[in-house]
Image: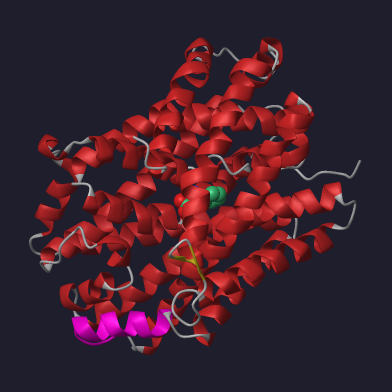
Amino acid sequence: MTERGNFGTKIGVVLATAGSAVGLGNIWRFPYMTGQDGGAAFILVYAVCILLLGIPGMVAEFVVGRHGASNAVRAYYKMGGRWWSAIGYMGTVTSMIILGFYAVIAGWCLQYLVASFMGNLHGDANYVATYFKTFSSAPWQPLLWTIVFIVITHLVVIRGVRKGIEKFSNALMPILFVLLLVIVVASCLLSNAGKGVEFLFKPDFSRMSQSVLLDALGQAFFSLSLGTSCLCTYASYFSRQTNLLKTAGQIACVDTLIAILAGLMIFPAAFSVGIRPDSGPSLIFITLPNVFQQAFSPTLGYVVAILFYALLALAALTSTISMHEIGTSFFYEELHISRRRGAIIETVVCCAIGVLCSLSCGAVDISLFGKSFLDCCDFLTSNILLPLGSFFTCILVGWVVPRRVVKDEVSNWGTLRVSVYAVWLFIIRFISPACILLVFLHQMGFV
Ligand code: PHE
């Protein structure tokens, strides 16, 4: 058996796992979903979903991961036997596909970082929209940025668990937080910013609908990295002293806080310049450069734009590191090759997917079922594979694994007092599978 790394410190565990959770999902997806789904009411439902579905689901994945102390495929095998290793395979494949398309969007952030630095994003609203369309549908530039992003991820991952993942997350997460706070303060000081804050915190229950509920559930999945075996893989590096329930709670808090801060960064500025909050996924790439120019003085706008895209790229990096680690640890341990070689296989596969995703954004017509290849990958993973992965994990931990094993993991072999154990177990046995099934059926168009 190969020697396995471990996270060295308690704070390292939390920061690395929070680094995985915090990413484009918080800073790009959460604000645009909030904008589309009516603001505060959506946030309220989202918070309930994190509490009811997210935290218990995370603990279930942690139980499998720490118990297995190996890559996800082996961990599920050790927990439930041969058939259950399929969840590990599914998570490993899912993470490769997500890394492929996620790196395309992360690559756009790098391009925007450079463009902001060179002052190339300066112009009126039409200019910015055309800039985005021309750039994202060009063949070479976005493709190169995609590969650059995957290679940067590769370079961090091959340094190993403690020297690579933990060290980088420890450094990047606090930087990210400070950068975010700086932009939030700048944004909230703008005239009319109060309207944006009100939009975020004063619920308008007339906007509450079934689709808000289900969108919030789906967003909670993606944002916490639930269902990809990512949390399971990171938990395999936890020590026997790591408190699983507390860690899950802390990560969910950090993740939600960053998402809310992202909202506080975007909406006050958007309201201040009269830009509609519901402009969708293009919010960051088309709307925000306008916001930066119109809302701040030229010098401040220039600095804020650079800070923002740097922040987004950093947040994406700590997430891509975690996705990469799933495949790397699988190839390394299952094929009995060096960690370096395992990482190379993962990088090559993800680059291939990333290249197709990038080209499908306009340069080449690569479409399946009437969607671009990138949209297909996004749909297949977020809408099908993530809910499936988490659903089966809850079934495995809640119904299949002997109760003693589960209790030992959650209570650190009886050394922790876990008063909420019974509540958690009830949730993962009944509530979570039912909710996940609902999200799944909705996303497949059945509900
Ligand atoms: N949670 C990450 C984000 O919010 C995305 C992610 C999904 C990361 C699945 C790892 C696995 O951006």
Residue 409 visible to the viewer: yes
443 and 40: which one is in front? 443
Q: Main secondary structure of the magenta part?
A: helix
Residue 130 sits in which quadrant? bottom left
295 and 108: which one is in front? 108
224 and 370: which one is in front? 370
In this picture, residue 78 sits left or right of residue 447: right
5 lies above or below 282: above
Check if residue 124 falls in the magenta segment: yes
Q: Position of residue 360 (x, y in %)?
A: 49, 74
Q: Quadrant of the C terminus?
A: top left
The residue located at (14%, 40%) in the rendering is 207
Furthest residue in direction front, as rendered? 369
Q: Position of residue 341 (x, y in %)?
A: 83, 63
Q: Position of residue 78 (x, y in %)?
A: 78, 28
In this picture, residue 188 sits left or right of residue 371: left
63 lies above or below 422: below
Q: Which residues are magenta?
A: 122-136
In this picture, residue 361 sits left or right of residue 399: left
Residue 293 sits in which quadrant? bottom left
